[in-house]
Amino acid sequence: MRTREQFDIEVNIRQIWLVVVRRWPIIILSGFLGAVGGGVPPMFNTPIYQAGGTLQLVPQQSISFVGLSNDRGLLNPTSALSNPLATEMLVIQSRPILEKVANQLQLRDSNGEPLGAGHIGRNLEVEMITQTDVLRLGFRSERAADAAQVVNTLMHVYIENNVETNRQQAKATRAFIDEQLPKVEAELEAVEFALRRFKENNAVISLDREAAVVTESVAALEGQILAQERELETLNIRLEFVNRELGLTPEQALTANALSQSMGVQEVFRALQQLELELENQRSRFTDENPTVQSLVDRKNRLEVILAERVNQITQESLDTYAVIEAGQQEQTLRAAIVEDNLRAMGLQRSLVAIRAKLDGFANRAEQIPRLEQRQRELERKHQAARTTYETLLAGLQEARVRENQEVGNVRIITPAEVPIFPANAAKLISLELIAGGMLGSFLGLSIAILLELLDRSIRTEYEARRFFNQYPVIGTIPAWYPQDWPMAAEGEFRDVNYNLPLVETSADPTSPLYAVTVAYRRLQTNLKLINREQKARILAVTSSIPGEGKSVTAANLAVSLSLVSNRVLLLEADMAAPQQHEIWRLSSVWGLGNVLQEQIISEQAIQSITPNLDIMSAGIVAPHLVALLDSDRMEILMRRMSEIYDYVIVDSPALLVAPEMLSLSKLTDGVLLVLRPGVLNKTDAGTAQETLRQTDLNILGLIINGVKSIQIKMPQPDVPVTPEEPVAVDFLGRRLKPDGTATDQGNQSTEEKGQSTLEGRSPSPHALNQPSELHQADTAADVIETEDTEAVETTLAMETMTEYAHLFQEDYSDTVVTHAHSEEEQDTRVEHSNDHHDTGVRNGHNPGDQSTAVGPYHDELDYGEDVDPDADTDIEPKPKPKLDRSWLSSVTQTWRD
């Protein structure tokens, strides 16, 4: 494991970029000073003058055999790849030409020494002008007149040499053509023969057309595969959903129907039921030793043996015989539907195998086509090159014979050199010095910035936080948000908002400024759910290294997120030194955890209800000696008891470096979530916290990085008005509900179950099948799958499955209602909080239809207005969580995600 010192000195590219972003003023200032220091000295250098002229090289038809018509008069006839302009550049810079210029001019330096061909070559520049037949000549000298004189003399000497060279070149050209023409002709015939043999051996007529046909066939087959895979996926989801509700495989469903329809099994089972009723009646009158009771018991045992024998005659599978035989017609029909869907899925699988086999055949041919095309193009290129060379040589032979008797040059002067007035080196040298000085200064500034960064002990970015605590996984990143992003007023009504808490359910609308915060907490609770599949962590401690990193806000939002997916959650305020939860939720802090640990009240009296799924136990009385009670047996008993009542217990724990009791408290939990906030935590405190965690055996589930500024918060467009959609309510059959709660095509329906308690001023839970109405405009689940929206896919599949099997339970469960959004009337049923109720520790605001809570069994026994003695004894025991009914109705009326 790497130490803190290794983290401090290790520098990579990303860290350097972060240093540049944070320390850019130092780097820019150093670069500016370096550029200024490097640009001043060159202003005093000796000026150098440069004169230039241009030459045009005129192509001639006498050497057209090489195939370059624009430069044919300049090509070397021994190569078809040579560049004529480059060749002439070397000729101009050759020593014979330069010596002639030096002899004619007799140049001397400042000391009177003669300047030879070497001096002229070092100061001579020859370059090509792009896409022309023009060469630019330049010469540098300390004397302006010498520069112009050298360029003009060199151009005249080169033209004289070119005239003599052309006459000799014409003779060499003719001789070369006579030698090469037979070879090129034989090469052309060989390439033509190879191309014909290639097409015959590979049955090639038109590879381009064949490739198009193969591509179209592959696309069509892939489309069929995609469609059938989507249908198969839909069937598998439906089978999984129905199998989960019935608890049977397709084979077991077929066997169960056989048992339910067997007359012999049914007769024995009915006789056994009647005998059991009679036995219960006799047992209520006599003891088990009575002969009548003993006779009935013997008859019951014989009937059970007969029933087992008849069941074994039908199937050898291990099934719940009584549950299977008692199934009604509806469940038998569902079992038959499972078998039918399974057969359809098997048919699709076999069809996919056949299509994929055909697709493999086309794929093999598609793999061969590129290789064949490559070989064909290679042969065609060789054929084209050989034919072009042959035709060029044949035509050039006649031209060379004519040119051999001519003495015409192919070079002319376009622009003679003039005496320069201004030096040519001043601007260039100053520019180079400026760049070099600026680069050196910037590098020095970067070095200083890196040094300052190494001395800086703060953790500023998410990347640094991840890197410092790399031994723990990051299960959530919460974006930074600001009070000005919160909508404070809506149509003249001001909302009472606590800036310390952007509750996740208040920004479910994608156009909300806090939508990114909502998504972050949903992702956090999803990651936590994945971790729980292996570790089964139900008591979670949320802590941080030091105060001020947002652990209390994170714990509150995590509790809300978990409660919105039908989990019963208790948020326990254990930070006795600096409690925050009662301020975040604006709750009473008269009674709380401190009072429970001192046995002043019972735990149920300290619990305050927020929603049917979310309860809070604040810190209550705060005193320095109460912190030590966190490491007591009372605390352990309380934690174990709360874990039996709630699905999750979120403990807002003290910071690691503030309260040593945090380590003892965390051992009572199933896992610890460590909150980090870049910009607040420094490396020294982080290292101390890391060392503390390393010395203990705490189960660190992961890190939650809070206040990440790199996550963009999606803001609504200010110039585009957002028109709120009217809420639409439908029942489980997809029928629109009228304002009075009745379906459009059916009589009055019960709307009592539609109301769900929500927080004051917040939107309903997004996980109660209240998805936007656009999700239900798709025809099938396959249409929604293309949108890659997981929640939309699950909702659409649920509606499709319920619609398909609706006829099985329409008469019994027609009053079940699932709404897309809460109307204004339904929002009036939300839980109302009263400070008076919180003072006494009595949970309030529960309707009879609400699901059970921590003190649910005693909700009806306590009157809201009565006073509760905190010192009184009580025999209240936690009631175990009710088991879900496995009937079809329970699966329909519950939230799809459950």
Image (cartoon, grey):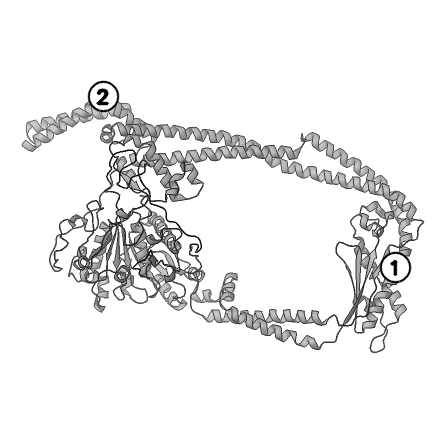
Image x and y of residue 638, in percent: 21, 56
Query: Quarter of the image containing the N terminus?
Result: bottom left
Left or right, residue 298 beside residue 533: left
Name above or below for residue 88 compared with residue 49.
Answer: above
Cα separation, mark 1 vs mark 2, equals 120 Å
Q: What residue type is labelled 2?
A: Gly
Q: What element carries label 2?
A: helix
Let me know if residue 287 appears in the view: no
Name above or below for residue 642 compared with residue 121.
Answer: above
Q: Residue furthest right?
A: 405
Rendered residue at 7%/27% (across/down)? 292
What residue is disc 2 on?
264
Q: Earlier in the sequence, mark 1 or mark 2?
A: 1
Quarter where residue 705 is shown: bottom left
Image x and y of residue 486, in percent: 36, 59
Image x and y of residue 672, in percent: 32, 57
Let me know if residue 766 appears in the view: yes
How would you rate the neighbour count of disc 1 (Cα within 10 Å): few for under 14, some for 14-19, many for 20 or more? some
Left or right, residue 82 beside residue 210: right
How would you rate the neighbour count of disc 2 (Cα within 10 Å): few for under 14, some for 14-19, many for 20 or more? few
Q: Which amino acid does label 1 sit on?
A: Ile
Q: Is mark 1 on a helix, strand or loop?
A: helix
Image x and y of residue 716, in percent: 42, 54
**Marks 1 & 2, CB-CB < 8 Å contact:** no
What residue is disc 1 on?
159
Of residues 814 and 580, the one drawn nearer to the viewer in this rendering: 814
Disc number lying in front (1 or 2): 1
**Res. 715 mark:** none
Query: Quarter of the image containing the C terminus?
Result: top left
Q: Residue furthest front?
A: 492
Rendered residue at 15%/48% (across/down)? 860
